[in-house]
Image (spheres, helix red, strand yellow):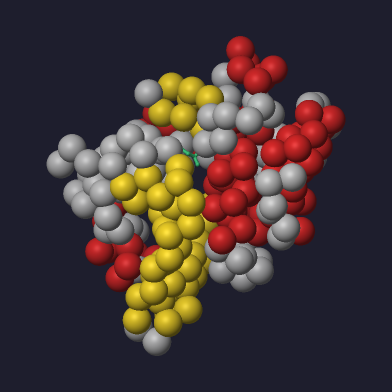
Amino acid sequence: MLEVEEWKYERERMVEEQIVARGVKNKLVIEAMQKVPRHLFVDKTYYPQAYNDYPLPIGNDQTISQPYMVAAMTEELKLTGKEKVLEVGTGSGYQTAILALLSHKVYTVERIANLTMKARKTLDSLKFRNINFAVRDGCMGWSDYAPYDAIVVTAGAPDVPTALIQQLADNGRMVIPVGSEYTQVLNRVEKRRGRVHRIELFGCTFVPLVGKGGWNN
Ligand code: SAM
């Protein structure tokens, strides 16, 4: 990834005050959050707010997730650099960048073509080479490249979509917000010897997962 000096001090402060202070411990996640220039994933008018402790608009009524949420979800995946990862909800591409630094290959799907186009442009300009993009309903996963060692869903679902459970590898981990359209609980789903284990982690608020197995369909 291309190194970007601008807003470095703000990035360090974000990591210290919002991420380490709240208990994220994984060194690789912390380093990745220090490296990725979050301001480049939002419109220029939002640059001064890019390292603040909240989500921001990215157009099409969608948001770039709060930095802490990105770090906490990524930490739950326990990535070592070897994994094949599926991300449902590319959005701005910010979490995609963090995942791409920490895994072997990222497959990211988004239902809104305009967001995929913008995210791809940003990630290409930062010289990421291990990301595959698709515009599709992520509730159905991306079966062509399954199974995945890790799956992250960045929108709130009524329940864990069956296709995503099917496409999770044995010993794989998934994080997904599950609940109502307005408030959810982050769930960690693991598959061990074909059996699914599900743990509720903490409360969160995401935009709805829209599609078959999501909302409005
Ligand atoms: N991690 C992203 C970021 O930091 O920019 C978060 C993006 S936002 C919170 C969630 C994204 O999920 C939105 O861009 C939305 O369009 C997308 N989304 C919602 N339902 C989807 C579906 N069924 N398939 C793929 N993407 C979906």
Tell me the residue at 65%/20% (across/down): 49
Looking at the image, the residue that sits furthest to the top is 45
Tell me the residue at 30%/58% (across/down): 160
Provide residue 97's location: percent of width, then percent of height. 61, 46
Provide residue 153's location: percent of width, then percent of height. 42, 51
Tell me the residue at 43%/22% (across/down): 59
Whether residue 176 is visible: yes
Q: Quadrant of residue 17?
A: top right
Provide residue 177's location: percent of width, then percent of height. 40, 50
Q: Quadrant of residue 76?
A: bottom right
Tell me the residue at 34%/59% (across/down): 142
The answer to whether 85 is drawn above or below residue 197 in the figure is above
In front of the other: 198 or 105: 198
Q: Quadrant of residue 19?
A: top right
Look at the image and tell me in which quarter the C terminus lies: top left
Whether residue 105 is visible: no
The answer to whether 79 is drawn above or below residue 16 in the figure is below
Horizontal side of 67 relative to 193 (left or right) equals right
Looking at the image, the residue that sits furthest to the bottom is 193
Horizontal side of 106 relative to 176 (left or right) equals right
The answer to whether 112 is drawn above or below residue 196 in the figure is above
In front of the other: 24 or 6: 24
Horizontal side of 165 relative to 214 (left or right) equals right
Ligand 1 is in which quadrant of the figure?
top left
